[in-house]
Every structure is written in C-alpha cells, then in structure tokens.
Amino acid sequence: MIQEYSGRCPVFHMDLYRLGGEEEFELIGGPEYLDCGGICLIEWGQRLGRSFWGPEVLTIELDFQERGRIVRWQGARP
C-alpha cells in the first residue's frame, strides 16, 4: 500500500484503495509517513478523514471523459 522513493526529498506513494478506514491507515503506519518531512502522494485520499491532513495540502481530482479529461486542483496553506 505504501511505496517509498528515496532522493533529495523522499516521496511516499500511498494507494489507499483497499483501505477499510482510518483505523487501518493507522495500523499500516500512515500517520508516521505524513509527519516525516517528505512528499506524500495519496490515491483514494477520501478514505481518510481530514484530521490526518496537514496544513499544506494540494488536492488533485482527475475526471476522465469521452473526449479527454478534466483536472481540478485545490490548494491550502496555513
């Protein structure tokens, strides 16, 4: 569910599709990744409550259509 990529800035890709809820996120150590200073890319982030989200969040939504796709993003800063 979590793939780590090392480099100057570590990247953590989390695919939460099979996640049953917030308790399972805690069991796999998800909160520790959110606080480790790297970049967390989270698929199916809606399976988490907003209580896990930090103050700087960029949400990207992809909507695939017949004739292309629509990309929406929303950012938040403290």
Image: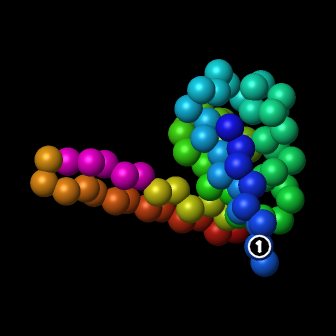
Quadrant of the rendered image containing residue 50: top right
The quarter of the picture where the C terminus appears is: bottom right
Counting from the top left corner in percent of width and height, residue 76 is at: 59, 64
Residue at numbered disc 1: 7
Q: Residue at x 77, y 73 (%)?
A: 7
Q: Identify the residue at image location x=78%, y=41%.
A: 30
In the image, taking residue 6 as reference, residue 76 lies left or right, namely left
Taking the image as shown, residue 44 lies to the left or right of residue 49, namely left
Residue 58 falls in image quadrant: bottom right
Left/right of residue 12 with respect to residue 67 in the rendered view: right
Q: In front: 33, or 47? A: 33
Residue 51 image position (x, y, % from top left): 73, 41
Counting from the top left corner in percent of width and height, residue 63 is at 31, 48
Q: Main secondary structure of the magenta part?
A: strand
Q: Secondary structure at mark 1?
A: loop
Q: Which residues are magenta?
A: 61-65
- Whether 36 is drawn above or below 47: the answer is below
Q: 77 and 66: which one is in front?
A: 66
Up the image or down, 54 lies above or below 28; here it is below
